[in-house]
Structure formats: structure tokens, C-alpha cells
Image: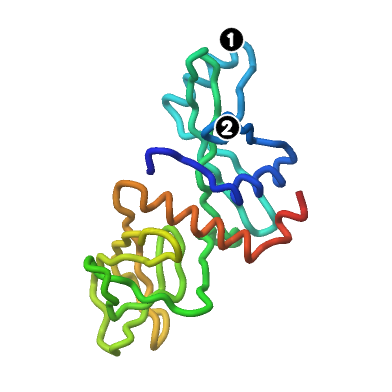
């Protein structure tokens, strides 16, 4: 997790449309809900927040968005729920993470920022589909960087799971500590919005 579970301006606007309410106030550095359920209800929620994982769920047809919530107390002892980047799931007979199918494959970078031979065709928070542009067999494991336009690359570590076609192999991602997992979820959420504008119009 990153130090701050912030939503970008576009992500916040999307949530506002889903919920039909404004989450922003220019003075707040983090988008949040004010919790005002009275002393008893707030104490119960605070207790749950310390010992449980809180989430906001939104279902749209065959897709489910799960926003992590962090409960924080301000200097006036008021409780706030802060939104994090969501997990996006494709529902059906088997639920799985929504995958972003890239229009053009993206070449992963090594530690020095140089292109590796591995290219990403699909990606989710839990896995990627790769090929090897040098036509060699793919490794059992990889530790490389996903370049993003206008941002620092995201570190990805993967373990080979299975071959899905003559060209592509599936890898399970082991997200590293720090902000990489959160940043990957933010990126996927942004791409999901661009591909599914109808979800915004339904709110």
C-alpha cells in the first residue's frame, strides 16, 4: 500500500457519479466521507475498522468494483472513511480479476530502464499474459518494471503458471511492498473507466 490511498481527480469524479454525491471539498487533502452516526455507532465502526477490512462494493452487470476504505480520526475526534483504488472483478461462473487487454503489447524494462525481451499483452492486479519477442522460452520467474506514460514504472514480479497459446504464457503476480500494487490498481481503474463509459452514465 502507498502512504496515502488517494484517488486522482478523474477517479474521484467517477466515484461522485456512481454515488450521486460530492466527495470533495477543496480544503480536504484526501477525499473522504464524514461519519456521523452518534457516539455509539461511531465507536462500533471504529472498533470494526481496527480489526476488520472495510470495503465499498459497487455492482454493474457482470462487473464488481471493490473500494478499500480506511477509517481515520481527525484532530476533533471525528471519523472519516477514505477511499482507495478499487479492485475490479469480472463476475460469472468463476469470479476473476478484470484484465486490461492492451491495444499494443508493452515491453517490460529491466532495473536499468532498458527493454527486456518480455512483452505484456494483458494485465490485472493478480496476473499478466506475456510473450518473449526473442522467441526463447519464458523464464519460471521474472522481476521487471512496467513503464507507464508520464509516471514512474511499476515493479512487477511474476511466477509462470501455464501456457495459454503458442505465443502467450500466463504469470501470477506477486506484488512487492510499497506503492506498486496501489499504483497498478489506480492505472487499471483509469483504463477501466475509459473502456466502460456506460458505467458512469448509469449512475
Quarter holding residue 156: bottom left
Would you name the residue on which mark 2 appears? 32
Q: Helix or strand or loop: what does disc 1 sit on?
A: helix
Q: Are marks 1 and 2 in contact (CB under 8 Å)?
A: no
In percent of the image, x 63 and y 57: which residue is there? 63
Q: Residues within 10 Å of mark 1 (few under 14, many from 20)?
A: few
166 or 200, which is in the foreground? 200
Up the image or down, 35 lies above or below 125; here it is above
Q: Image check: 101 left or right of 153?
A: right
Precedes in sequence: disc 1 or disc 2 = 2
38 or 32, which is in the foreground? 32
How many numbered callouts? 2
Q: Helix or strand or loop: what does disc 2 sit on?
A: strand
Residue 34: x %, y % from top left: 61, 24
Quarter holding residue 119: bottom left
Image quarter where the N terminus lies is top left
Q: CA distance from mark 1 to mark 2?
A: 19 Å
Up the image or down, 101 lies above or below 23; here it is below
Would you name the residue on which mark 1 appears? 39
119 or 50, which is in the foreground? 119
In percent of the image, x 43 and y 24: which residue is there? 50
In percent of the image, x 51 and y 40: which residue is there? 68
Q: Residue 102: which disc?
A: none
Quarter holding residue 106: bottom left
Residue 49: x %, y % from top left: 47, 26
Residue 121: x %, y % from top left: 45, 76
The mark closer to the camera, 1 or 2, is 2
Amino acid at each position: 500500500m502507498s502512504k496515502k490511498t488517494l484517488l486522482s481527480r478523474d477517479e474521484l469524479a467517477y466515484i461522485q457519479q456512481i454515488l450521486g454525491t460530492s466527495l470533495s471539498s477543496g480544503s480536504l487533502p484526501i477525499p473522504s466521507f464524514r461519519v456521523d452516526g452518534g457516539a455509539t455507532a461511531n465507536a462500533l465502526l471504529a472498533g470494526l475498522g481496527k480489526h476488520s477490512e472495510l470495503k465499498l462494493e459497487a455492482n454493474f452487470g457482470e462487473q464488481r468494483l471493490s473500494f478499500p476504505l480506511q477509517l481515520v480520526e481527525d484532530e476533533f475526534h471525528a471519523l472519516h472513511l477514505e477511499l482507495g483504488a478499487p479492485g475490479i472483478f469480472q463476475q460469472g461462473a468463476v469470479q476473476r480479476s478484470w484484465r486490461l487487454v492492451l491495444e499494443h503489447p508493452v515491453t517490460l524494462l529491466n532495473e536499468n530502464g532498458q527493454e527486456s525481451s518480455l512483452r505484456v499483452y494483458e494485465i490485472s492486479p493478480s496476473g499478466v499474459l506475456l510473450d518473449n519477442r526473442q522467441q526463447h522460452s519464458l523464464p519460471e520467474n521474472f522481476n521487471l518494471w512496467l513503464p507507464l506514460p508520464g509516471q514512474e514504472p511499476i515493479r512487477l514480479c511474476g511466477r509462470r503458471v501455464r501456457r495459454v497459446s503458442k505465443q502467450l504464457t500466463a504469470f501470477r503476480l506477486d506484488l512487492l511492498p510499497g506503492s506498486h500494487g496501489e499504483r497498478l490498481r489506480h492505472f487499471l481503474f483509469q483504463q477501466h473507466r475509459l473502456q466502460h463509459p456506460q458505467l458512469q452514465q448509469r449512475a
